[in-house]
Amino acid sequence: MAEAKEGMKQRNVAAGDEAISYLEQAKALKSELVGDFASHYDDTKKSIGDSARNRKLVENLIHGWSDKAPSKLVPIIKMLAPAAAWVFSISKIGFNVFLAFYSVCGKYFARLPYHLVMAVFGLILCFFGGTFPMTIAAYEAFHTCGWENTQACIRDLQESFAKIKKEDDADNLKDENHDGIADVDEIGNEELVKRKTALWMRAADPDKISSATMSLYTACLAVLAALKVQFAKTVALGIAIGNAIRPIAAKFVAPALAQALPEAYHHWINTIINATCKTIAVLIAYKVQQIISAFHSGIRGGLFFARQAIKFTNSHGWTQIDEEKTYLDEGIGWFMAFLGIYVQLSHNFGLPFPINLLLLPFSVLEYVIYWCVTSV
C-alpha cells in the first residue's frame, strides 16, 4: 500500500514537472512569437514606405513597354499605367504580409507535436468536412496525381522567384555614380526596361521555371478533370431525377400555369416546368452529394482523430496502448464519426462562429475550386 502511494506521488510530481516545463516553453514561445511579428511588422512598414517609389518604377516600366505596342494602344496603356502601378503595389504589400504570416505560422507549426496537430485536423475533418466537398476531392486528386512532385515544383518556383526578387531589390538600391540617387530612378523608361529585362533573364533559371510550371499545370488539369467528372455525375443524376418527376409536375402544375399565364404565353409552360424540375433536381443531387461527403469526412476524420490521439498519448508515456491489437481507436473513431455526421447535418453544413473565421481560407478555396469546375 505504501509503495502504491509512493508510486502515485512520484507520477504526480512528474506530471507537475512536465506541466511546469510546458508553461515555461509556452512563455518562451510567446516572447519569440511577439519578436517575430514585430520584425515582420517593421518590414511591412518599410514596404509601405517604399510603395510610392515602387509605383513610380512600375509606371516607368509600363511606359517603356508601351513604346513597343501598336500606336493605337499606346494612349490606353499609358492611361492605365497609374492604376496598374497601384494594383501592383497593393498586391506586393499584401503578398509580403501573407508570406510573413505564412513563414511565422509555418515556423511554429513545425514545433507543435505532430500527432496532436493531426488529431485536431481529424476533428475538423470529422465535424466540418462536408462543408468543403470540392476541397477534399481536390486534395484526394492531388495525392493521386503525385503530391510529392507538386511540392517539389512549388519549392523550385519559390526558390527561383526568391532569387529574382533578391537580385531586383539589390538593383533598385544601386548608386554607381554615387550621387545619392538610385540609378533606376535616374534612367529613362526604355533603358529601365532593358535593364530590368536583362536582370530578370540573368537571375532566372528557365529550365527549372518552365519544368515546374508545366508540371503544376499538368497536375491542376488532372485535378480539374477529376472534379469535373464528379460534378458531371452529380448533374447527370439531377437531370435524371428531373426527367423522372417532370411528367408528375406537368400533370399538376401545367393547369395552374395555364390559368395564371395569358394564352399568348402558354407555349412557355412546358419549358418552365422542364427547367424548374431539372434545377430543383440538380440542387437535390448536389445536396445528396454533400451528405455523402459528410458521411465520408465524418468517418475518415473520426477514425483519423482516434488513431492520432492514441499515438500522441503513447508518445508522451501517458498510455501504453498497442495500436495493432486494440479496438479502442475504432470505438472512439466511430463514436466521433457519428457525432460529426450528426453535427454537420443538424447545422445544415454551416460553420458556427468563430470556426467560420478560422476556416475562412478553406471557404474561399472551396468557392474558387467550385467556380473553376463549373465555369471552365
Image (cartoon, grey):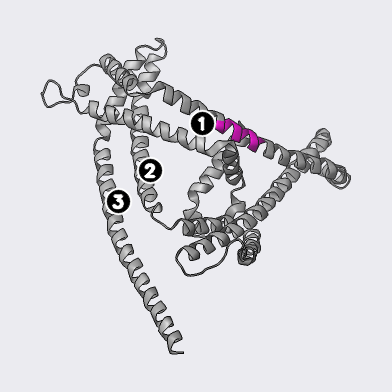
**Looking at this view, is 168 or 355 the one in front?**
168
Quadrant position of residue 112: bottom left
| Amino acid type at mark 1 | Leu
Looking at the rendering, in which quadrant would you find the C terminus? top right
Magenta residues (range): 219-228
Instruction: Say the numbered circle drawn on residue 37.
Output: 3
Asked if one can make out residue 84 in the rendered structure from this viewpoint, the answer is: yes
Left or right placement of residue 280 versus residue 121 in this view: right
Is 105 situated left or right of 214 in this image?
left
Q: Distance between the residues labelled 2 and 3?
A: 12 Å
| CA gap, disc 1 and disc 3 | 32 Å
Query: Mark 1 touching mark 3, by CB under 8 A?
Result: no
Q: Which amino acid does label 2 sit on?
A: Phe
Q: Is 264 situated left or right of 157 in this image?
A: right
Q: Which of marks 2 and 3 is nearer the N terminus?
A: 3
Residue 98: mark? 2
Residue at image x 32%, y 18%? 197
- Predominant secondary structure, magenta span: helix
Q: Is residue 352 above or below residue 58?
A: below
Where residue 333 appears, as percent x and y from the top left, is 62, 62
Q: Residue 216 carries which label?
A: 1
> In the displayed structure, would residue 194 be above or below residue 3?
above
Q: Residue at x 68, y 39 (%)?
A: 230
Label 1 residue SS: helix
